[in-house]
Amino acid sequence: MSEPSMSEQPVSERAASRGITVLRGGVEQIAAAAGAAELRGFDAAWSPEFYTRSAVVTLARMAGTTRRVRIGSSIAYAVGRSPLTIATEARSLDEVSGGRLVLGLGTGTRRMMRDWHGADPDGPATRVEELVPLLRRLWRLHEGPVRHEGRFYHVDITPTAEVDAPPRTDIPVYTAGVNSRMVQVAGRVADGFLGHPLFAPSYLDEVVRPAIALGAARGDRDPAAVAVCGVVICAVADDEEQARREVAGQLAFYAAPKAYAPVLALAGFDAAAARIREAFAAGDHDAMVAAVPDTMIDALAVAGTPAQVAVQLRRYDGVLDHMIVYPPSFRLTAARCDELVNQLLEHAAPTPATEGAPA
C-alpha cells in the first residue's frame, strides 16, 4: 500500500511539510545530508539531476543512509531514458528504499532536450502525458504483456519468464513544469507537481493551481489528489546581507535562460531578468548578481538570519503542500556550500533536532 498523499487535507488547513534538496556536491555528500535531514525531522530528501550527477545513483545511496523519509528525484530527466529504463530504475529504487520513492520527472528546457539529450524537443507535455501511464503499466508487467504504440514511445514486451510483482505498483509520480500546458500534465496524469525555484507564491496561486485543475478536469480526476510541491531557494547566515547576496546569485543563475522570462515577467521582474540575461551573455557574473533587486529576493526566495528564515518559511504554509528548501551554490566555495547545507538542516527543519532514532 502506498503512503498517504501529501495533499489529503485542504492545503489551507495545515503547514507545508518540508524536504531538502542539494544540487552541488558528490553522491556521498548528498546521501549524508539525507541522513541528517531524517534526524532533523524533515519529511523528504530529494536529489536533482544535472550534467554532473545522476539522480538515480544518488537516490540509491540515499536509500542506504535513511530509514523513514521519502526519497525523491527533483527531477530525473524523462528524456534520454526509455520508458523501460525509467520503470526498472524506479522499481529498483522503491525496492531498496522499502517503498519510500517519489519519482519526480521533468524534461528541462527545449535546448536541454535537444542539446543535452539529443531528443526531439517538440511536444514535451504530450510526451510526459504518454510516458506516465506507460510507466504504471510497466510496473504491472507481472499481470501480462505490455504493448504500446504512441507518438513518442513504442513498447512491446511479452515476458518470457516468471515476473514477480514489485513491492508497489503505485509508485508516486510527480511531474515538473513551468508554463500552464506543462503544469496541466500533473493534473492529468501525475500524483504531484514539482514547482520551479523561480515560482513566487502568486505564480502558484494564479497559474499552477488553475492549470492543475484544468488538467485534472480533462483527465476526469480530482485536483485535490495532486500534491503541489515547490523548491524554495534559501540561505541562512548570521549576517543577513551575506545570505541575501548568496540567494541573489542563485536567482540570477536560474533567471539567465530566456525560457523562464514569462515567469519573471508575471512577478514583475521582466526588466531585471533582461539585465541578468545581458550580463550572462557577456560572461559577467558579478553583474548578473547585481542585477537581482531586493524585491526579487523578497518575492522569490528566503534569506536572512536564523530567526528571519524561520519566519519567512511560514509564508509557504497554505500555498504549498510540500516545500523543498534548496541552498544556493552559484559562485560559492565548496566549504560555504557544505556550511549552508548544515545551517539549513538546523534552521529550516520542521521540528527541533532530536537525538537518537529518527522521528
Image (cartoon, rainbow, N blue to C red):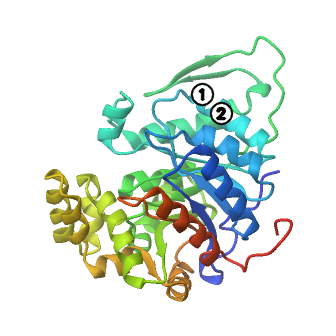
Q: Is residue 236 above or below residue 274?
A: below
Q: Which mark is residue 202?
A: none
Residue 118 visible here: yes
Q: Residue at x 58, y 57 (%)?
A: 192
Q: Position of residue 87 (x, y in %)?
A: 64, 33
Q: Position of residue 23 (x, y in %)?
A: 49, 53
Q: Residue at x 79, y 27 (%)?
A: 143
Bin the neighbour count of mark 2 within 10 Å (Cα to Cα): few under 14, some 14-19, many 20 and up.
some
Spatial CA distance of label 1 from label 2 is 6 Å
Q: Which residue is mark 2?
A: 89
Bin the neighbour count of mark 1 within 10 Å (Cα to Cα): few under 14, some 14-19, many 20 and up.
few
Q: Residue at x 54, y 61 (%)?
A: 338
Residue in the foreground of this view, choosing between 23 and 142: 23
Q: Position of residue 189 (x, y in %)?
A: 56, 48
Residue in the foreground of this view, choosing between 328 and 165: 328
Element under label 1? Answer: helix
Q: Is residue 198 above or below residue 188?
A: below
Q: Amino acid at mark 1?
A: Thr
Seen as rendered, the residue at the extreme top is 160
The reply to whether the C-beta atoms of the residues labelled 1 and 2 are less than 8 Å apart is: yes
Q: Position of residue 12 (x, y in %)?
A: 59, 82
Q: Amino acid at mark 2?
A: Glu
- Examine the image and state in which quarter residue 16 appears: bottom right
Q: Residue at x 38, y 70 (%)?
A: 246
Locate residue 100 relative to residue 213 in the image: left or right. Answer: right
The quadrant of the picture occupied by the C terminus is bottom right
- Examine the image and state in which quarter residue 50 appears: top left
- Count of numbered marks: 2
Locate residue 24 relative to residue 30 in the image: left or right. Answer: left
Q: Which residue is mark 1?
A: 85
Element under label 2? Answer: helix
Residue 5 visible here: no
